[in-house]
Image: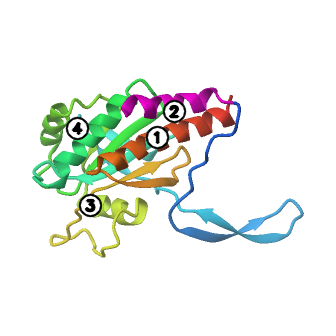
């Protein structure tokens, strides 16, 4: 199954036909745009991931700028979780293995329990899943900022909250982000078939950019 998925993506690279284009997801905002004719038009601007700054498992600052020109997959987890998170991390590890030689693809895992998940704790967890330095970042930071990113940036949950002491996010959603910081897919990180689809969709995005920039 794995080989077929990767092969399908590589085939798309070499094809001269336009690749299948994934939809752009998320909320669209109407903005006032000035046309070439000097007139004002209302156009739809897709939702994009807002700027962020977090700390990874090596104590390094990772910002939105480090993901410029990158396709990336992101999720939200915590290291002491005994239910969905271990399965999600194995799925992300599987993704990393498929795309380990593809420099345009990265992975971000945000903790939802920053009080427990210190930098050393994240590093130990990352090492258990053979995370490649610079490829797969395990991120921590201010809880309010992490929860704002989950809700308002990646739109992974519809629950309300302020990132306060009693607030808690627990979701199996993986999110696929393109090079323009747009959301291109949501997937259940605990479902192997969904992970297969995610691998295929990353290949489709790579093919889309390869076709646009031959």
Tell me if 140 is positioned left or right of 82 in this view: right
* Residue 128 on image: x %, y %: 15, 33
Looking at the picture, does residue 167 appear above or below residue 149?
below
**First in sequence: mark 2 or mark 4?**
2
Label 3 crowd bin: few (<14), some (14–19), many (20+), radius 10 Å: some
**The residue positioned farthest toward the top in the image shown:** 101
Q: Quadrant of residue 113?
A: bottom left
Mark carried by residue 57: 4
Front of the two marks 1 and 4: 1
For label 2, the residue is 8
Front of the two marks 2 and 4: 2
* Residue 183 on image: x %, y %: 49, 55
- For the residues labelled 2 and 4, the Cα–Cα distance comes to 34 Å
Q: Which residue shows up at 14% across the image and 48% down it?
A: 79
Label 4 crowd bin: few (<14), some (14–19), many (20+), radius 10 Å: many
Label 2 crowd bin: few (<14), some (14–19), many (20+), radius 10 Å: some
Tag 3 secondary structure: loop
Q: Quadrant of residue 41?
A: bottom right
Q: Which residue shows up at 17% across the image and 46% down it?
A: 86
Looking at the picture, does residue 68 appear above or below residue 76?
above
Tag 4 secondary structure: loop
**First in sequence: mark 1 or mark 4?**
4
For label 3, the residue is 171
For label 1, the residue is 200
Q: Are the residues flagged by discs 3 and 2 in contact, CB closer than 8 Å?
A: no
């Amino acid at each position: 199954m794995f080989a077929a998925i990767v092969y399908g993506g590589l085939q798309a690279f070499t094809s001269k036909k336009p690749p299948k284009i994934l939809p752009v997801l998320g909320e669209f905002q109407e903005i006032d745009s000035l046309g070439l004719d000097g007139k004002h038009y209302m156009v739809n601007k897709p939702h994009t991931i807002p700027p962020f700054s977090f700390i990874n498992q090596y104590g390094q600052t990772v910002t939105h700028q480090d993901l410029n020109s990158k396709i990336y997959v992101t999720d939200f987890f915590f290291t002491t979780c005994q239910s969905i998170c271990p399965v999600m991390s194995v799925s992300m590890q599987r993704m990393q293995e498929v795309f380990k030689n593809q420099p345009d693809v990265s992975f971000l895992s945000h903790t939802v329990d920053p009080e427990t998940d210190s930098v050393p704790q994240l590093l130990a967890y990352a090492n258990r899943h053979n995370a490649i330095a610079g490829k797969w970042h395990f991120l921590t930071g201010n809880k309010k900022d992490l929860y704002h990113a989950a809700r308002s940036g990646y739109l992974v949950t519809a629950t309300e909250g302020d990132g306060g002491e009693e607030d808690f996010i627990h979701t199996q959603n993986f999110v696929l982000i393109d090079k323009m910081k747009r959301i291109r897919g949501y997937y259940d990180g605990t479902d192997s078939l969904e992970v297969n689809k995610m691998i295929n969709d990353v290949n489709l995005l790579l093919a889309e950019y390869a076709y646009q920039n031959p």
